[in-house]
Amino acid sequence: MPTVSVARDRRFFLLNGVVSLAALTLLAWLLLVHRGMSDTGLNLRFMPAVNACLNATSAALLVAGYVAVKRGRRELHRGLMMAAFVASALFLIGYLAYHAVHGDTKFGGVGAVRTIYLLLLASHVILSIGVVPLCFTAFYFAWRQAFDRHKRVTRVLWPIWLYVSVTGVAVFLMLRPYYPA
């Protein structure tokens, strides 16, 4: 039986890697190559505010899910974590849509505030790269009822996911003055 489990795990990790790499490649292409489609007439300028709300929602759900599992409320924890994942997934869809249409938003601040922004953004972007594959891995282990493995993954995932969600809101607030009206 362990051979079946190892093979199943191997297939999952391969699929997880392919999906995560595809998502990262799409995002890199949108931000670094594509630069937006200003000629479509589509206006998604409201999306950054919606995305900030989705990030804030995800952060609140992550904290509530953490509290629930610490109190032994596994079903509530499961629901809250699924809701946090949905909020983050909706954020990602909205983020991709916004950047597909409008391209990147440049930060216009100077001096110390620019340095703070760039450090915050760099840490946010670098850590966000791991959220999707770690989320899939945590959900996979929970689904397989491999809770010891699930717990090991979430010890790394949870603080990263929370940080990325909170700093996503901070990045939005710092960029807000530079979004076109």
Image (spheres, rainbow, N blue to C red):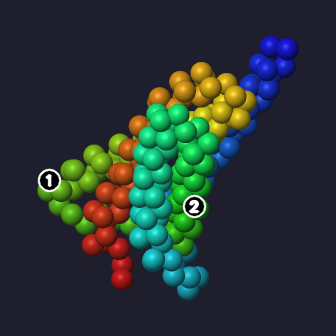
Q: Amino acid at mark 1?
A: Ala
Q: Is residue 173 above or below residue 10?
A: below
Q: Is residue 78 above or below residue 94?
A: above
Q: Amino acid at mark 2?
A: Leu
* Label 1 element class: helix
Q: Is residue 47 above or below residue 71?
A: below
Which quadrant of the structure image shows residue 132? top right
Number of the label disc, if any, that sits on residue 112: 1
Q: Image check: 16 left or right of 124?
A: right
Residue 83 at what x, y percent from top left?
57, 53
Residue 99 at what x, y percent from top left?
51, 66
Residue 121 at what x, y percent from top left?
34, 50
- The residue positioned farthest toward the bottom in the image shown: 41
The residue at which mark 2 appears reads as 90
Q: Does residue 161 appear in the picture of this structure? A: no
Q: Is residue 130 above or below residue 10?
A: below
Tell which of 155 and 107 is nearer to you: 155
Which quadrant of the structure image shows residue 73? top right
Residue 30 at what x, y percent from top left?
54, 60
Q: Does residue 82 appear in the picture of this structure? A: yes
Identify the residue at image location x=71%, y=35%. Answer: 143
Identify the residue at image location x=60%, y=23%. Answer: 149
- The residue positioned farthest toward the left in the image shown: 111
Residue count near mark 2 (Cα–Cα under 10 Å), binned few <14, some 14–19, many ≥20: some
Quarter of the image with the C terminus is bottom left
